[in-house]
Image (spheres, helix red, strand yellow):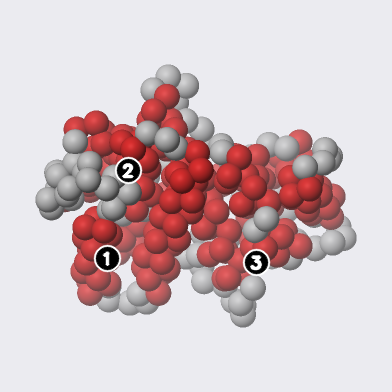
Amino acid sequence: MNTTFPHDPADISAHEDWFAAYAQRQYARCPGDVSPLRLKRDHTFGVLAHARTIVAEDIDDPLTARACLLAALYHDVARFEQYLRYDTFRDKDSRNHGLWGSAILRHAGCLDGESPAIRRLVRAAVALHNRYALPARLPAEAARVTQVVRDADKLDILRVMDEHLSGPRPYCPTVVLGLPDDPGRVSDIVLADALAGRVAAYADLTSVNDFRVLLGTWLHDMHFSCSRRLFAASAHAVRLIAGLPSSGPYAAARACLLARLEAVRTDRPTC
Ligand SMILES: [Fe+2]
């Protein structure tokens, strides 16, 4: 692919075309339900849109900005192979899709027209976007690009999950990571994280309701004022948390998470 940076660093249309064609080829290989792959394609362009918003407000350097947009576009490139080979999006039951995505980009050659610096930043961000925490010694520029992708990713996952969980049951096992929709299953660790203002971990989820809580705790993992504001203003976030039971073990976490969203929206301190 022959790209034209630096004429317009924000123009990644050739890459968007490459990605759309790649997704089409993966659909054609799918013998069963292709809807989870379409969901990942739509998610990718949703993440790219959020990344553009964050970059416009918080990233001044054109090279870094371009790396952010490319990393957003390619961050889930491995999801297609993951679903086709393993029939799941759970890394635990298949492979780490961040590291795998970085390897796919290396072999696919779609970044060959970019500078070595951009290639390195994009591959690093794709490899690291799904880590629970970033390596402490990650260079600042790579960390910044990865954080843009992580924030944009989370903002669009709110949409994906809200649209799915607002729809009819039963939920698609692939979308809810195989978690049971069982109100009797509660993770004390996830609830404790929510109440303490910590980001909950996928590994601690035991049910769909735990997943709703985890999504709400992502407010504490937004790295830019823009993304934090977008998260707090998201009707998807409010609906996901409000969908938790308002009595019983989830009640306190539900109230606390909703209050925190409100506090960020109105710039007031909370629990
Ligand atoms: Fe991902």
Is 166 displayed left or right of 268 in the figure?
left
Residue 222 in the image, given as x and y percentages of width and height: 59, 41
- Mark 1 vs mark 3, foreground winner is 1
Secondary structure, mark 1, is helix
Q: Looking at the image, is 90 positioned above or below residue 196?
A: below
Q: Check disc 3 and give the amino acid type.
A: Asp
Q: Residue furthest bottom?
A: 168
> Residue beneath label 1, please?
20
Q: Residue furthest front?
A: 7
Mark on residue 181?
Answer: 3
Instruction: Give the mark nearer the N terminus: 1 vs 3.
Output: 1
Q: Check disc 1 and give the amino acid type.
A: Ala
Can residue 75 be seen? no
Q: Looking at the image, is 130 positioned above or below residue 12?
A: above
Mark on residue 66?
Answer: 2
Residue 30 in the image, given as x and y percentages of width and height: 27, 72
Which of 188 and 14 lies nearest the eye of the viewer? Answer: 14
Q: Residues within 10 Å of mark 1 (few under 14, many from 20)?
A: some
* Label 1, label 2: how far apart the Cα atoms are: 19 Å
Q: Quadrant of residue 162?
A: bottom right
Instruction: Give the mark nearer the N terminus: 2 vs 3.
Output: 2
Which of 143 and 54 lies nearest the eye of the viewer? Answer: 54
Residue in view at x 82 percent, y 41 percent: 268
* Label 2, label 3: how far apart the Cα atoms are: 40 Å
Q: Check disc 2 and give the amino acid type.
A: Arg
Total count of labels: 3
- Mark 2 vs mark 3, foreground winner is 2
Residue 229 in the image, given as x and y percentages of width and height: 64, 47
Contact check, label 1 and label 3, Cβ < 8 Å:
no
